[in-house]
Amino acid sequence: MKRRVFLATTAILMAGAALPFSTARAADTVTWWYESASPEQQRAVANGIINPFNESQSDYDLTIDYRGSELDKQMRVALLSGSGPDIVYTAGPAYVAPMAAAGQLMPLDDYAVEYGWNERILPVFLEMGKYDGKLYALPKTYETLGLFFNKTLFEEHGWQVPTSIPEIETVADAMLEENIVPFASGNANWRPANEHYVSLVLNSIAGPENVYKALKGDLPWTAEPFVEAITKLNEWWRKGYFGPNYFSLSDEQAFSQMAAGQAGMMPTGTWQFQRVSTYFPQYDAEPGFVGFPSADNIGEPVFALGVGSTFSIAAKAENPEGAAAAIDYIFSDDAYAKMNEYWQGEWNTPIADLSGVTVENVPELYSDTMKTLADAVAHNQYGYTTWTFLPPATDAFLVNGIEEVWLDRRTVDSFLEELNKSFQSELEQGKVPAIPAR
């Protein structure tokens, strides 16, 4: 899922319309509700997961319903009434803790032992799916934020790929001089795109160690490193780095703008790899991707770690055994190979050992980036995305509050004070997702 973003598509799908790719069989049905997906993406899920799983055994029949942008709301209502699907698909770890606390999710520890998930899945992601010491969720994909750029445009202008905050500002200023938008961006289809940029500056300017301390409650969000980070982000906004049409462009339109050379760079997540083959060939341009530059006192790029969505089993699931079997298949080598061929950037499941997995028809840029991210995770060289590690109410305020800063309705200090107040309250209530030790 796009960072935890429910992808908007141009296809108009009826809420609850079942995917018509699997054949009904005399087997126990396993129900799974999913977000939005284009017809092509639905075929990818059918050919990469649904049909192969159903054909691999005769006990269960996995079905999928596409619920669109209303998935989260519908899921909450269904779980409250005990009428939801067997497989609970959430927008990320921040959603898991309150659901687990409310008794809506089933502990997965026994299934983790039965299926060997403790050995097959990277430990840091197992920790992120825990609440009160028990495992409640497995992440669908892990992702990072970085900097896409139009490599062809950079070569034409003789611009160097930035490796520090001052260098990215130098390039961005040069782009403004050429009437090129420095940061291709837009939140018209997904307002929480706002927090992509907050996550970037928190990690690249304030630094991951400070973010970690704040998430653990050892440093207030009003501390000077965070003031510096948000002040810098606001400065970029005011200088016009995000262009004049941020609130009217979708992220897909912004990506197309970058491929066309109308924008030079795009600070965003690895989920955007799914758009590379669609847009860059149209303009005979070559894409690039690097870790987002960091402040001088930090050094190497910081890869902010994110989980785009999670899988759980409903506490009142009609077929929990089948749901566990289906989730296990999703984390198989075969499913990883197929889904990363069909749908890059959205199905990078955190399997610990990929040495026996061969993914065909994948651009080298994508495979290299995923390898770099895996190495960063393995060596604890990662940061923290807000949508993965902040509790729900705090995260919701961040998305709205940063707009208020940009639009002169709130100061940086006021924004951070309110953020800290919300976070401390949710921390006391036990709503902060599990934070893996560094």
Image (cartoon, grey):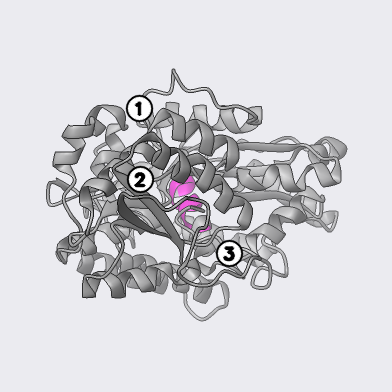
Sequence-wise first label, 2 or 3: 3
Expressed as whole percent of the image width and height from the top left, the position of residue 108 reads 19, 45
Would you place residue 392 above or below residue 260 in this image?
Answer: below
Find disc 2 in the rendering and name its residue: 139
Q: CA distance from mark 1 to mark 3?
A: 31 Å
Q: Is residue 275 magenta?
A: no
Q: Residue furthest bottom?
A: 409
Query: Looking at the picture, which amino acid does disc 2 mark?
Result: Pro
Q: Residue furthest top?
A: 355
User: Between 70 and 96, which is closer to the camera in this rendering?
Assistant: 70
Expressed as whole percent of the image width and height from the top left, the position of residue 363 reads 66, 31
Residue 218 vs residue 21: left or right? left
Sequence-wise first label, 2 or 1: 2
Q: Secondary structure at mark 3?
A: loop
User: Between 169 and 131, which is closer to the camera in this rendering?
Assistant: 131
Q: CA distance from mark 2 to mark 1?
A: 13 Å
Query: Looking at the picture, which amino acid does disc 1 mark?
Result: Ala
Q: Residue at x 72, y 42 (%)?
A: 277
Q: Residue at x 59, y 67 (%)?
A: 187
Sequence-wise first label, 1 or 3: 3
From which residue to which does the magenta span run?
Answer: 197-205
Find disc 1 in the rendering and name its residue: 352
Expressed as whole percent of the image width and height from the top left, the position of residue 188 reads 62, 70
Q: Residue at x 30, y 75 (%)?
A: 77
Q: Would residue 7 be visible to someone looking at this image?
A: yes
Would you place residue 33 above or below residue 49 in this image?
Answer: below
Find disc 3 in the rendering and name its residue: 8
Would you place residue 359 above or below residue 191 in this image?
Answer: above
Q: Residue furthest front?
A: 26
Query: Looking at the picture, which amino acid does disc 3 mark?
Result: Ala
Q: Secondary structure at mark 1?
A: loop
